Structure formats: C-alpha cells, structure tokens
Amino acid sequence: MHLPFRATDMKDSSAAARPYRCPDLPSAPVDAVRAELAGALEHGNAVLSAPPGAGKSSRVPLWLLEAPWLEGRKILLLEPRRVAARALARYAARLLGEDVGQTVGYRMRQESAVSARTRLEIITEGVLTRRLLADPELSGVGCVIFDEFHERSLHADMGLALCLESRAVLRPDLRLLVMSATLDSHKVAALLEDAPVIACEGRQFPVEERYLPLPPAAAHSGPQALWPHMADVIAALMRQESGSLLAFLPGTGEIRRVAELLEGRLPADTRLYPLYGMLSPQEQDAAIAPAAAGERKVVLATAIAETSLTIEGIRLVVDAGLSRESRFDPASGLSRLETVRVSLAGARQRAGRAGRLEPGICCRLWQQAEEHDFRPQQRPEILDADLAPFCLQLAVWGARRPEDLPWLDLPPKAHLAVAREQLAGLGAITPGTEELLPTPLGRQLVKLPLPPRLACLLLRAREHGYGALAACVASLLDERDPLPLADASLALRLDRFCSPSDSHGSFRRLRQWAERMARLADIPTGNAPDASGASLLRTARQQLPHLGEVVALAYPERVALRSGENNGMAQYLMRNGKAAVLPLTDSLARQEVLAVAAVDAGTRGRIRLAAALDHDVLEKLFRAEITESEDLNVSPEGQVNARRRRRLGALLLDDAPLPRPDGDACALALCAFVRDQGLRVLPWDEPARQWLARVRLLHQTWGDPWPDLSEDWLRDELENWLAPHLGNCTDLRQLSPARLADALHCLLPYPLPRRLEQLAPAQWQAPSGRSHPIVYDAEGGPFVAAKLQEFFGCEDTPHIADGRVPLTLHLLSPAGRPLQITRDLGHFWRNGYPQVRAEMRGRYPRHPWPDDPLTAQATARTNRQLARGK
C-alpha cells in the first residue's frame, strides 16, 4: 500500500523550477493592493479581504510566483469547490498563455492536471490535509493560499490549523494567505499571529434587487409551491430582459423540478443547463462556459455557483434563498441533509453574480422583512460535521487533544465523543482514553482518501477475498447516490455500476474512483489491470453475492432485522437499537435481514441504501459479538418464564423456552419480582407476621443485638435472606408459609431465638391460667385480649421485655366484645369496673360479677361451672 502523495513528490517540482516572471495581466481592482500585499507576505502571513469580482483568486497567486522569498517553490491554492478549482486553473493558465498542467495545475480527488513544471497547484477537499500528513514540512511549498475562506469548510479549517502548527514547529518560512469576501477578517488575522488585514474594493456593477415572494394565495400551499413560482419568475425575466440567467436552488431535486416546469416556456434563443456537484466535469464545464453566439442560457445551480465562478453573460439572478447543508446528529451517529435559509452574506454573494460584468437584476423569492431572521454568516462546517475522519487525521498528525490546535471555532465535544467511539470501534485509535492515539490500522486507514469507515471496509473485505466488490461499494457510498429516486437496493446500483456499457455520467466517474481505490489498497482484481477497469468490474460482479457481507463490514451497527409491517411500511430494527422503515413496494421490503448502508436520521428513519444479508452469513460474520443469555421474567401471578436468547446488540436472533432454568437464577428473578411488587405478595401467615413484629419491638427497645428487620431492609436484602430458601421454585406460589417462616427465623443468630421467647413471648398466661396470643403488630403497641373475669385478682398491668413494655389489655365481655381497653388495670378496677358491672350483670347473669374483683377468683367459667367445680 502506498500514499497518494509522497514527500519526494513534493520536492520534484522545486528542483525542476525555472525562472518565472508574471506577465502583464488585465486590470482588476485587486491591483490597487499588490504592493501592500507583497510587502506583508515578505515578512509573514496576511489576510486579504476583497469582494467578488476583485480578481483576487486569479491574480494574486500569479503575482506571488515571482516573489523573491518564494525561492522557486510552489504555491498551493486551496479552493473549496471542484468546479471552481478547475475553472480557476484554466483561467489562470489562459492568462499566462499556457495550458493547464504547465505553470498552473490542479489536483483534486479522482482528477489532476499537474506536471514537473507546475508552480501554482490549485487543490480541493482533503488534498492539503493528506499532503500535510505525508509531509508535515510541505517540502517544496513556499506559500499556502486559502481562497473563499468564508465558506468555512472543515477541510479549510483543518488545513489552516495544521499549516499553523507546521509553521510554528517546522517551517517558520512558510507563508499563509487567507482570502475572503465576507469573513470577519480580524478574527482570522488574530489566529494568523496578528497578520495584517489588507482590504480592497471590488468592481461591482449596480444590481437592482427585487423581492418577489410567493403570492399570498400560494403561500399556504406548502414549500413545493415555491418552484412553480420560481419557474414563472425565470420565464418572465427571460422574456423581458436581455442576458443570461443564474438561478440558485437548494438541491438536484428542485433543479429537476424547475427544469420540467420551464420546458417549452423559454425563448427560442435560450438553452437550459443544470449545475451541481454530482455532474461530470464535462457537464459542469458546459454550464459555466459562455453562451454560443446568438444564444443565451439559464443555469439552474446549487450553492456551488455562489463564489469563485464567473459565468459569462450572466446579468440576471433568481435566488430561492435556500441551501442544503449536512448536519451530523451525535445522538444517532447519522448525518442528514437539511434545507436551510441562506445567510445574509451568501445572499449578497448570490446577488453579486448579476453585476460581475454589467448592471444586472437579482430577484429574491422572499420578503425583505424576513432577512431579520437570516444568519449573518454561513455556519462553519466544523460545528455540524461527522468528525471521525477529522479525528483520525489529527491522531496521525500527533494531536492528542483536538482542542489544543488553533481553531477559529472549537469542534463540539459531543461530535468528538461520537467520533472517538466510532474510531475505537473500527480499531483505528486506542480505546478507553480521551486522547487520540492511532493504532497501526488507523495509520493504514488514513493513507486512503476515504472516510475511515469505508477505508476500513476496503482493508477488511480484502482479507475476506471481496476486495474488488468493496472498492466499487466504497466508491458508490463515498459519493451522493447516483440513483436517488430508485428503491433502496444497493445491488441494483452495483449491477449498473459493473456494466461498462452503462453510460450514466456518475457511474463512469465512480468506476474510475473504484479503480484507484483498488490500486491504493493493493486489491487484486483477478486479471491484469487494464485501462478501462473492466477486470475490476468483472471481478466485482462475480463477488456480488457477498454484497450484504461487504456492507455489514462497513456498517456493523446498522445490520437490521425485519420486525413487522405498519402503514405500508416494512419495519426494521437495527443492531444499534434504532428503528428504520422501508416502503412495502421496495424490492428489499420482504427481506428478513438487511445490511443498511444509508438511512435517514430520526426515530424511524427511512432506509435509503441496503443489501440483503443471509442469516447464516450474519451468524458467521459476528460470531464473536453474539451474546447468549438465559432470560427470566415473572408473570403477574409470580410464575417464572425462562427463555434462552441470542442477541447481536439490540437484535434478537433466537428466542426459545428453557425447560429447566437454573435454580439460583429463578430465585433471583423471584426476588426481583417481590421487590417490584412489594413484600405483600409473599405467603404471610399470622405467626410469621407476629414473629416479625416481636423482633422489631425488641430492636426498637434495645437496638443491638436485635436486627433491624424493617420493610425497607427486608426488600433490599431479599437475595440474602429469601433466595436461599426458594430452592428450585419456579413459581412464587410454591413458597409455603412454613418455608417463609424458616427464612425469617434464620435472621436471628443463636441465642437470640431463645431470648425472643423470653422477652417477647408469643403467648401470655392470664391469672385464670389460660394462655392468650399477644398481638404485636397493632398500631398502639402489643396487646392481649381476654374476658374481663380472667383478670380478677390482678391489680398490676402485665409487662414484657423485662418490664420495659406494658401490654395493652383488651377486657372482653362474655360474648367476646370489648368492654374496656387499658394499660392501668388497678385504676380500672377502682373507677371503671363498678359501672361496667352495673351494665353487664343483668345482660350476662350466668357469669360472675363480684363486688370486689381484686379478691375474686380469676376464671373463664360461668357461675354454674364454678359451682360444679366446687
């Protein structure tokens, strides 16, 4: 495996450099600051603030090539958009009277035009980052220019941070120039070691701004009503005004919709062109080229045309005021495209397109008052992006803590945490630490110009023998879906991908990308490589039966099982616990297992790209991660239901009854059930309740050594005191009151059981000689109930607990009804008994009611029984 760039490559150009002198260039507003800018860069870094049309992108790099401090080295110009980089390289080369690839060249992913003579290299995307990782000194490079920095792409922010570190540690002679039209220049200047800010005026012709919001009648029809309105505005402008027109829309779907609505409505001299990132270079070139003689053009574009592009003949702009931006959701780990309002700075940039070459008109499809709610500037991508590639690159760079690098905006902590988790899961960084520590695999992954997940897919699939297929899958997944309106079948796309005869523009470009990926990852294609890449496609087609496995290697957390149907949707549950849906009309909707490559964010995201996965392959692929468990749950009646279950994350692979569950596990499950339902579900009988109350009374009276058997303690300690006595119970109803009593009794160590009987006896013997149970769990304390006559002769109230606790006496009538409740028996005999005797002797004449109860014999018998006994 080898890097796309090597340090030796960086030095070749300077060795081959020849003297350069900038020719006379057409005048431009930026000419006014040429000397000031040259002086600033003579001593260090600089910030150039210049509006669109000032000529900064094309002139400044060509001037700097002759600067003495450059010493024949290269200039790298970072351009955020591919179409702009290509167009700028051609225009700058034309200013020099050369072809692209001589003094001026460009390099981007999947495409380059450079030679040993190239001194100005216009680069895009992550090219600068990968170059810095391969060669931190940027050997052979004297200056790095960041153009259109106000767009605040993640690559630009990261490239600037790494260049600042390289300059601080390795290359103090490296010049950095940041150029922007709308950015807070002084904030950037502070980051660049207080670099001077140089401002110049632009050359902008007057632009008439017209606000043409949706008519009130259509405003309530939903967002789709905007596109017929836009088509009406475009058609009217092209009939009424001269010149060509540029329209800004949020995405390709809206571009197609407006194009359909304009069909047959434009003047005969007008041609219609789309312009967006997924078009081929040839299609993009056609959109930005000047209109043919005698013709005009209408260009329907995304934000790709907002900056750095001048389309000849444009003097009309129609702006929908919307853009589509990627937002990463750290909660779901997914990115989603959101349609948002353009920023005020972006709206000004778009309007400026109408006045680059002559006075123009900009029609804005919103009310001017709405601009109070617009963001002043575009939101930096670092705040909303998936930071996994970013973190892996920082780890290999040696930045252990991302926040320690010089940033204009710190990356969000939540996004960093998700990135660390993903990279650790891939084995790319060391897990269990907040620092970014790359593993050998991580260092391999960063050499491939792919996101870490897809780079990992290439290497793992190569080990499984499916490398050619993985290269094709990676190239598809690394770009926007070439068939966004088709169903979710990735196999459908791969079938067309692997057919060289399919002339779809996106597929042609993606095939070239797959071929390059295969070379970089040392993937054999089964035959000698050929220029067309046909051997790779033939091998990939042979490997298509393994597509589900390849996708699962890249997105293991998104393996999904079908869980049912609802409202015309097949329901799926993914391994990560997220729900997903697929229309029943989709070709994959009947598949039981899917490997999901793309899914919308949200609680029930729609599956956008997936492949069927055989259940046996799933088992083989994740054998080491499948867990087995014996799961027990208890019914409301207290019966244990035992199941043997096999799981992969949130996915339930097998669920079978367990005929003989483990006894200890059953005991623990029953204890959990009792804890949840409360101790009342246990088979309490009266002796058990009273025993518990007796122990609690002694704990309340003495404390130690009597244990605290409160309800909270018993509930918290069920596993310790109840579980050992549940035996092989699989139903709480198998626990008898006797076994519950045994469990409770074991809570009293020797000799406390004997002391319990002495201090808190279960029975009390009345003066009559009969024993009566003492009730301990009454609200007013322990009491004993007996017939009044059984207390004759007894003046003192009985006590328990070594005399510390008096018994409450319930004095009953011969019929067992309460006559008196007292804790002072002597007081009752003297004061209450006479009245009770007067009322009861007539009602119960057969029972003794003596005048003096203290001298009478205690008895439970009637007068007749007493007489017979004598």
Image (cartoon, helix red, strand yellow):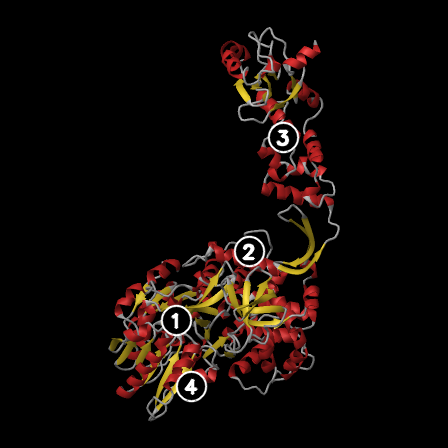
Tell me the amino acid under the disc marked 4: Ala
Residue 54 x, y percent position in the rendering = 31, 75
Residue located 39% across and 72% down the image: 64
Looking at the rendered structure, which numbered label has been put on residue 323? 1
- The mark nearer the N terminus, 3 or 2, is 2
Between marks 3 and 4, how big is the CA–CA gap?
92 Å
Label 4: state its secondary structure: helix
Q: Circle 1: is it few (<14), some (14-19), or many (20+) Cα within 10 Å?
A: some
Residue 767 appears left or right of 831: right
The reply to whether callout 4 and callout 2 are in contact (CB within 8 Å) is: no
Q: Position of residue 135 (x, y in %)?
A: 54, 66
Q: CA–CA distance between discs 2 and 1? A: 34 Å
Mark 3 highlights which residue? 689
Q: Amino acid at mark 3?
A: Arg
**How far apart are labels 4 and 2 at the CA level?**
45 Å
Q: Nearer the viewer, residue 152 or 630?
A: 630
Q: Report how far apart the C-alphas of labels 3 and 1 lie in the structure.
A: 73 Å
Q: Would you call the spot at circle 3 few (<14 residues within 10 Å), some (14-19), or many (20 or more)? A: some
The tag earlier along the polypeptide, 4 or 2, is 4
Residue count near mark 2 (Cα–Cα under 10 Å), binned few <14, some 14–19, many ≥20: many
Where is residue 202 shown, x and y percent of the image?
28, 74
Q: Which residue is mark 4?
A: 286
Where residue 162 appears, as percent x and y from the top left, is 48, 62
Q: Is residue 393 left or right of residue 742?
A: left
Of badges 4 and 2, nearer the viewer stands 4
User: Toward the viewer: 588 or 772?
Assistant: 772
Numbered badge on residue 312: none
Residue 188 appears anywhere in the view: yes
